[in-house]
Image (cartoon, helix red, strand yellow):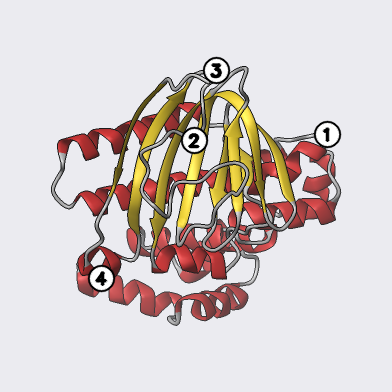
Amino acid sequence: MKSETASFYRYFPISRRDKNWGLYVTTAGEARIAAHTAYPPSGHPKGYAFDWQHGRMLEGFALLYISSGRGNFESKPKISAAIEAGHAFLLFPEVWHRYTPDSDTGWHEHWIGFDGEMARRWLNHRFISPRNPVVRLNAEDTVLATFSRVMQAIRGNRPALQQILAGATANLMGLFYSAQQAQPAAATQNPNAIELAMTRIQDEFNSNLDMKLLAQELGVSYSWFRHTFTGHTGLSPHQYLLELRLVHARHLLGETALSIKEIATQTGFEDELYFSRLFRQKLNLTPSQWRSRGRRRN
């Protein structure tokens, strides 16, 4: 086989400051793997090098994005996926895996390895899981622009480089999680249902929205709608509506002289007492106390 690749990558020493930041990068790079080329390329340090026959396990995490070509990915437990351009796959600490481009196409891979308290928290709270390591990222321009900024920062040896790379990593993982949460929508007749619902709620937050009727209008079952909406936002549709109303209520409390009753009405609360009770429950202050505190600060 030929050995033709075009690549740039770095592996980084990690300081106490980097670890204290909560998220740090261990390696980053990209490689264009030509068709009919031996893979993986040589030159990577022990702990990162591997071959298809044996696979490997890492001490930390790594996110890989394939911008062209195709190949295959396998990991435990019993994960096997065909990889195409636009796919990203996540590698987990101490989880066996292997991957390789198709010999007929090669591929263009971009990667960033990372670890830290923040990454472990994502894993512990199940934002990410070894059972769901592959997604299609429908944000190619953003992903490639982020990796480009990473490469520029590395080449320029920017001050506080680790903190810059950590920010880029968090951005990429946010896109990964967003794509992961959007996956169930592909099985519905209306893949944009959640985005349309969020816009509708934002536009009509002060009206008497019926979430079951909204789901029906969007052509999806309420059980699917509630589950998928919660996955997208971290809140049920009803809780999302209440939080949005409270955001607008705080704005009116701070920027107008409207009475509490008027603010409750304008933000969709028919009952002033319920509005005040919910406000205090969420913010540990009554609406009047919140307004007074804001005025003292000014």
Instruction: Report which residue position mark 4 lands on.
Output: 295
- Residue type at mark 2 is Pro
- Residue type at mark 4 is Arg
**Which one is closest to the eye, mark 3 or mark 1?**
3
Instruction: Report which residue position mark 3 lands on.
Output: 35
Q: Measure the C-alpha gap from mark 2 to mark 3.
A: 12 Å
Instruction: Report which residue position mark 2 lands on.
Output: 40
**Dot 1 crowding, Cα within 10 Å, few <14, some 14–19, many 20+:** few
**Dot 4 crowding, Cα within 10 Å, few <14, some 14–19, many 20+:** few
- Residue type at mark 1 is Gln
- Asked whether disc 2 touches disc 1, contact meaning CB atoms under 8 Å apart, the reply is no
Question: Mark 3: which secondary structure?
Answer: loop
**Which one is closest to the eye, mark 2 or mark 1?**
2
Quarter of the image for the C terminus: give it: bottom left
- Asked whether disc 2 touches disc 4, contact meaning CB atoms under 8 Å apart, the reply is no
Say whether residue 269 is left or right of residue 14: right
Residue most extreme to the left: 159
Residue 145: x and y in percent read: 37, 30
Instruction: Report which residue position mark 1 lands on.
Output: 189
Q: How many marks?
A: 4
Residue 108 in view of the camera: yes
**Counting residues from the N terminus, which is met first, the one under dot 1 or under dot 4?**
1
- Asked whether disc 1 touches disc 4, contact meaning CB atoms under 8 Å apart, the reply is no
Residue 291: x and y in percent read: 35, 72
Task: Decide: is 149 above or below 277.
Answer: above
